[in-house]
């Protein structure tokens, strides 16, 4: 008797859960960033001329961002392609003749400090050598002896760099995390996770699978977004799952992800973090970025919370399938809605009968 009621209740709860999840899929497929309401409007827009945006960045001294944006214009055949090529040549000629760049690079390599791209990059490069790891350990040891607080994460990662170097496994990622920590670009939650995983890896003298996955993702973000872009991303990362989303799009569509982060700012980074990691999401991002600020703004307008829930429940594939089918026939949108209504009504009736 009891087992029968328990099975009946379990079935009813499963119906209600299926109804709620189907409803979420319907809302995401219809209203989400990758839904047909957004993609139809994106396709109706013309391609954006980014050259004026790049020239404004150059006037503000943001030459690194301008150069990346102009190269994106050139490689994708967007409006202003010829002008973009001229500006790329001008920026590269100017940057190659700057003695100050070499000076900043040298400072970053020797001291492991600085905020400019050259200084941060040089600090990371020096960490790829034994000198870089020993330098950080010596500095942390000195601070401890001097009675100042020593950063345990930096010390642990430096020691991990030494340990893995013995096994020819050192990579850019540990050095980049150290640079991010020193620049204050790591959240407390992610820093705590890194510290715990780093210490466990040190004790085992081999990388934990979870930490190794983070290092791989971090490398993908660095390769796709550069040093400064990676530091911006890390400010929004609380756990490995947050990093994984940005890393996936950095592998698939590095240029579009970069432009989305530059023009979309924090909202753009959050969107990359929250969207389901799927080919359809990448396709919609690629389409929106071609349309410029208007397209990116349209992509960011729908609340990303539904997409985040869909991603957490691993329903991204279902939502993408419904969205893709709906572009051929809008009637497909009614499928998850019908399932949701039927399951919720059926579950509600079963609960009422049980209560009676």
Image: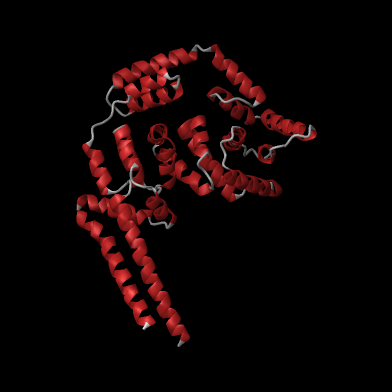
Q: Is residue 331 left or right of residue 14?
A: left
Q: Quadrant of residue 13?
A: bottom left
160, above or below 35, in the image: above
- Residue 314 lies, in percent from the top left, at 41, 56
Which quadrant does the N terminus fall into? bottom left
Q: Which residue sits at x=26%, y=43%?
A: 39
239, above or below 287, in the image: below
Give the color scheme: rainbow, by chain, secondary structure or one colour: secondary structure
Determine the residue located farthest toward the bottom in the rendered image: 1
Determine the residue located farthest toward the right in the rendered image: 145
195, above or below 176, in the image: below
| Residue 164 visible in the shown view | no
Q: Nearer the viewer, residue 53 or 111?
A: 53
Q: Which residue sits at x=51%, y=30%?
A: 228
- Residue 88 lies, in percent from the top left, at 39, 18
1, above or below 280, in the image: below
Q: How many marks?
A: 0
């Amino acid at each position: 008797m009891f087992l029968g009621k328990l099975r009946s209740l379990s079935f009813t709860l499963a119906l209600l859960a299926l109804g709620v999840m189907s409803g979420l899929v319907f809302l995401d497929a219809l209203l989400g960033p990758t839904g047909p309401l957004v993609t139809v409007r994106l396709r109706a827009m013309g391609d954006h001329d980014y050259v004026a945006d790049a020239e404004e960045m150059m006037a503000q001294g943001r030459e690194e961002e301008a150069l990346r944006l102009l190269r994106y214009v050139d490689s994708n055949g967007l409006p202003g392609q010829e002008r973009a090529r001229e500006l790329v040549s001008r920026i590269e000629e100017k940057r190659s003749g700057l003695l100050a760049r070499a000076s900043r690079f040298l400072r970053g390599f020797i001291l492991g400090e600085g905020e400019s791209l050259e200084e941060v990059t040089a600090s990371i490069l020096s960490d790829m050598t034994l000198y870089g790891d020993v330098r950080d350990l010596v500095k942390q040891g000195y601070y401890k002896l001097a009675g100042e607080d020593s950063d345990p994460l930096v010390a642990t990662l430096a020691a991990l760099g030494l340990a893995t170097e013995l096994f020819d496994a050192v990579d850019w990622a540990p050095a980049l995390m150290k640079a991010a920590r020193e620049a204050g670009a790591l959240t407390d939650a992610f820093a705590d996770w890194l510290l715990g995983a780093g210490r466990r890896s040190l004790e085992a003298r081999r990388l934990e699978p979870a930490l190794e996955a983070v290092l791989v993702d971090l490398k993908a973000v660095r390769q796709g977004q550069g040093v400064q872009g990676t530091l911006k991303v890390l400010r929004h990362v609380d756990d490995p799952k947050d990093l994984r989303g940005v890393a996936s799009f950095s592998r698939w569509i590095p240029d579009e992800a970069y432009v989305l982060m530059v023009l979309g700012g924090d909202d753009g980074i959050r969107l990359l973090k929250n969207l389901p990691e799927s080919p359809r999401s990448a396709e919609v991002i690629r389409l929106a970025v071609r349309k410029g600020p208007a397209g990116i703004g349209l992509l960011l307008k729908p609340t990303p919370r539904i997409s985040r829930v869909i991603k957490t429940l691993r329903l991204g594939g279902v939502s993408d399938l419904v969205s893709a089918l709906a572009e051929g026939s809008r009637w497909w949108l009614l499928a998850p809605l019908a399932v949701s209504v039927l399951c919720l009504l059926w579950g509600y009736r079963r609960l009422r009968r049980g209560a009676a």
